[in-house]
Image: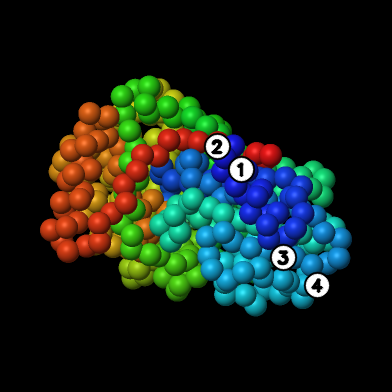
Amino acid sequence: MGSEQVQHVRDAFEALYGTEPDGVWAAPGRVNLIGEHTDYNDGFVMPFALPHTALAAVARRADGRLRLHSGDIEGGVAELDLAALAPESDGNWTAYPAGVVWALREAGHPITGADVHLTSTVPTGAGLSSSAALEVVVALALNDLYSLGLQRWQLARLCQRAENVYVGAPTGIMDQTASACCEAGHALFLDTRDLSQKQIPFDLAAEGLRLLVVDTQVKHAHSGGEYGKRRAGCEKGAALLGVDALRDIPYDDLDAALARLGDEEEVRRLVRHVVTEDARVQRVVSLLESGDTRAIGPVLTEGHASLRDDFRVSCPELDLVVDTAVATGALGARMTGGGFGGSAIVLAETAEVDTLTKAFEVAFATAGYTAPRIFEAVPSPGARRVN
Ligand code: GAF
């Protein structure tokens, strides 16, 4: 985090509110390496933090008012009354920070108000957790300013509640935990059932490798029905199979479980994805732990096929990235995040990056698609106070 950026956010706060902020906090977006649509099935995920972050300059207030401003979106300062915050009452970006304040107060934490100025470099609608970054940066700031003493995983849970109940998007816990808990140079192996964590060293550059993010620029939306339908289908599968969550179906019992689903073809496909995806996360963890980083490539590509064919959350642009990557010699590629647009990740030898970048540009131009945004993802720090 450059000191210039931090100063810029402080200056903007002062210009808006006429006083200095009490501090500045940062929270990153994420890429998910493997483990997609497993988090609301109590399964495994493996995200890492991006260098792209949300920044918040924040000051306490004592009068029950919440003032919110974004440096990225037109519209001035939103002024809210804490006592009037209500779930699903706000369809704007302000629902994310306001939802966090609502969730904290609902959990009994004595928040009496705040002035907030936010800005973010996390691309929006790109499957890179721009909303979780906004939630976590505000949660961390209030945790510090009000000396709440909450741990990172507790902040993540409150942010998820803000998103599920206040915003009204039925997401899992991965994105908020990634933003709150990731560490530089590591991927986070997270068990979403109990939030137990293991930081797995993930220094690709040292091995002559790169991980590219290819943002297709196709916008996705989580509160839209498709994500919720997948989640409901998974819950139906768990109920039909008599387990609390699909995570409870062991990989070795998958065929028997699928057979028990009878003519529920749609549910069968969802179950197959979730159970095989949990197994893929565990394979990737053991490959990384044994130093065999290149061997994770085919596991990523296999994960994409499962999301495309069984879970059905890909789109032609994401498939084009993956097909082009594999045809051009990448080690592996997959969509990342919720899908229906957004970004794909591509694991490649450093020497292949230029060739791959050109291949994506040509493939998109030939297909008549908007040019993708391509950048390298370096595992970066999680949320923190920066001033
Ligand atoms: C989105 C959700 F917010 C996450 O909780 C997760 O379900 C992901 O889609 C799919 O793995 O990012």
Judging depth in this view, the residue of 281 and 216 nearest the camera is: 216
Q: Is residue 381 visible?
A: yes
Q: Residues within 10 Å of mark 4 (few under 14, many from 20)?
A: few
Which circle marks residue 6 in the picture?
A: 1
Mark-to-mark CA distance, 3 and 4 = 13 Å
Where is 247 relative to 2, above or below?
Answer: below
Where is 152 relative to 84, above or below?
Answer: above
Mark-to-mark CA distance, 2 and 3 = 26 Å
Residue at 19% across, 56% down:
364
Q: Which residue is mark 3?
A: 67
What is the three-letter code of the residue carrying label 1? Val
Q: Nearer the viewer, mark 4 or mark 1?
A: 1
Judging depth in this view, the residue of 27 and 104 nearest the camera is: 27
What is the three-letter code of the residue carrying label 3? Arg
Q: Residues within 10 Å of mark 1 (few under 14, many from 20)?
A: many
What is the three-letter code of the residue carrying label 2? Gly
Label 3 residue SS? strand
Mark-to-mark CA distance, 4 and 1 = 31 Å
Label 1 residue SS? helix
Tell me the quadrant of the picture where the N terminus can be found: top right
Q: Which residue is mark 2?
A: 2
Tell me the quadrant of the picture where the C terminus can be found: top right
Which circle marks residue 170 in the picture?
A: none
Which circle marks residue 83 in the picture?
A: 4
Q: Residues within 10 Å of mark 3 (few under 14, many from 20)?
A: many
Q: Is residue 177 visible?
A: no
Labelled pair 4, 2 in contact (Cβ < 8 Å): no
* Residue 238 in the figure: left or right of residue 359: right
Q: Earlier in the sequence, mark 4 or mark 1?
A: 1
Q: Which image quarter: residue 351?
A: top left
